[in-house]
Amino acid sequence: MSQKSPISFGSKRAKYLNRLVTTLASPFEAFLESRTNPKESAVCFIVGPPRSGTTLLYEMIVTRFQCGYFTNLAKRLFEVPVVATWICRNEMRRRSGSFDSVYGELDGNAAPSEAGRIWRFWMPYAAPYSFDLPGVSPKRIHRKIAAICRLAGGPMIVKNPILQSDIPAITEMFPEAVFLHIERDWADNARSLMGLRAKRTPEDDTGWVSLRPSGWETYASADALTQSCVQVMLSHKDIETYLEGPRRAGRLMKIRYDILCEKPDTVLDEIEAFLAANNIAITRKPFSQKGLNIEPRKPPTDDTQTKIQACLEDLSGRTQA
């Protein structure tokens, strides 16, 4: 276990400025938390491998419905996310999606964020962080999320693929949480992951990106194509294993990426019904746009795509043997 801080900053100046703002805002954070009931923290988690369409689904939901989510400002002010939500609350209620994310990142203070800093601060002991630190108590986390939901006027929507490694801890912390599991064509998903790897590590394309699913160690020295296929395949396997209980309880909904792009209004209507069936009330924004036209991202049909298909078939055969 490492003893270092789970949060890194670009410079000492940024660190001290963040510390100053947090110190000044902390009393107001506590006040906002005190006005809520921790049991009111209805949470919906979006799960799926990186590059499977999780960001698209995330932005569609917060565009169509009135709901809580972590903003880019909350990510920066990770110790006082309720105050950040209070600052952005009106913009969040009016927000209309741009649907132009760059590898999961969206511009603007009120834009939805994966908020990795918040989760590292709240759960530094969880994989893949594994810091020997206590983090924030579950009761305090519930209070903060309940406060965000109250300010935003709806349930909390959470999207961060890294959390998939700790779904057991998440389901224990949020026993009534619901889950949206998005699945993209595995070969297309793996190809997109390879593109992300090349972007982030141009000189070393063997580095894993985002979450590392159960069993990744077996493929630690494999090439980028194989690792990308493994990441998609084992990620879905983890989700199905970890979320068997919520699935049996009717708290898991499966969504296909291609259908989401082809019929977004239909899928969003189904999500609304799914939440209602789980006693989670959600309100449509009065100006929410319908008839979204989302073009699914399709990789070219070439030799690389053929190799990805062959790799997935080989891996599938080995895991079932």
Image: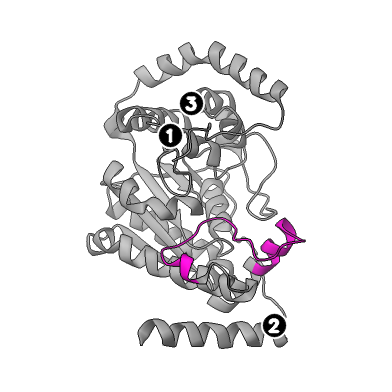
State which tag comes first along the sequence, 3 or 2. Answer: 3
Left-right relation of 95 to 45: right
Mark 3 closeness class: few <14, some 14–19, many ≥20 residues within 10 Å: many
Q: Position of residue 316 (x, y in %)?
A: 44, 83
Asked if one can make out residue 205 in the rendered structure from this viewpoint, the answer is yes
Mark 2 closeness class: few <14, some 14–19, many ≥20 residues within 10 Å: few
Q: Position of residue 144 (x, y in %)?
A: 40, 28
- On residue 122, the disc is 1
Mark 3 to mark 2 CA distance (whole Å): 45 Å
Secondary structure of residue under mark 3: helix
- On residue 304, the disc is 2
User: Residue at 65% of width from left, 18% of height from top?
Assistant: 16
Identify which amino acid the numbered label 3 is placed on: Val
User: For the residues carrying marks 1 and 3, which lies nearer the camera in this image?
Assistant: 1
Mark 1 closeness class: few <14, some 14–19, many ≥20 residues within 10 Å: many
The main secondary structure of the magenta stretch is loop
The one of 263 and 134 positioned closer to us in this rendering: 134
Q: Quadrant of residue 192?
A: bottom right
Asked if one can make out residue 296 in the rendered structure from this viewpoint, the answer is no
Identify which amino acid the numbered label 2 is placed on: Thr
Identify which amino acid the numbered label 1 is placed on: Trp
